[in-house]
Image (spheres, rainbow, N blue to C red):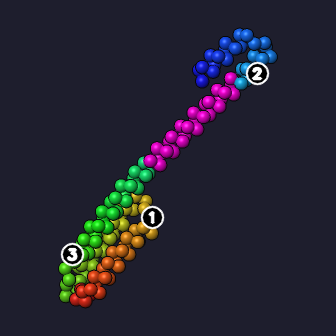
Amino acid sequence: MSAIEQHGEKALEHTGSEGQQQLRQQMKTASDDWKEAIDSLSELLAVLESRLQAWTKLDKCCEELSSWLSETEVQLENIEMKSAVADKQAVVTQLSVSFLACFLTFNYCEIEASVLVKCGMVVIDRLLVLTRDHSTFM
């Protein structure tokens, strides 16, 4: 922008009064447009930085959720089948607490509740498969 202003000032020296007025108006328009472009780019940069932070947070949450699902699957696969009702209830309580902890942990990530519900359904489906495979569980 400074180069435009310098060349414009030099051109003013060799321009008539009517031309100077037009040239000054064009320089002012160019300067205003430049400032507007800078402001727009600054706003865009702020939005992009905000979106990058959100993406980074979501990526971290997805990694944590994936890890939790893997750990939960291992936990479900390693459930010791119990015959006593109290023992069965303890296992179900443990799994419920695990899912609740997941829900509370990932709620800060602003992951849609539908994703968390789907995770819960995966856990419940796996538990149902286990109970069908091991009738002594329930």
Label 2 – label 1 distance at C-alpha: 57 Å
Q: Residue at x 32, y 78 (%)?
A: 126
Q: Residue at x 62, y 34 (%)?
A: 36
- Which range of residues does the magenta coloring cover? 27-52
Q: Residue at x 36, y 66 (%)?
A: 103
Task: Say which mark, if any, is on residue 78.
Answer: 3
Residue 88 image point, x, y percent: 23, 83
Pointer 2 local density, CA inside 10 Å: few below 14, some 14–19, many at least 20: few
Q: Amino acid at mark 2?
A: Gln
Residue 6 image point, x, y percent: 62, 16
Task: Say which mark, if any, is on residue 133.
Answer: none
For the C terminus, which image quadrant? bottom left
Question: Of the residues tagged 2 and 1, which is closer to the observer?
Answer: 2
Question: Of the residues tagged 3 and 1, which is closer to the observer?
Answer: 3
Q: Which comes before the other along the chain, label 3 or label 1?
A: 3
Q: Amino acid at mark 1?
A: Glu
Label 3 SS: loop
Q: Amino acid at mark 3?
A: Asn
Q: Residue at x 76, y 21 (%)?
A: 22
Task: Say which mark, if any, is on residue 112.
Answer: 1
Label 2 SS: helix
Residue 77 image point, x, y percent: 24, 75
Which residue is under mark 2? Answer: 22
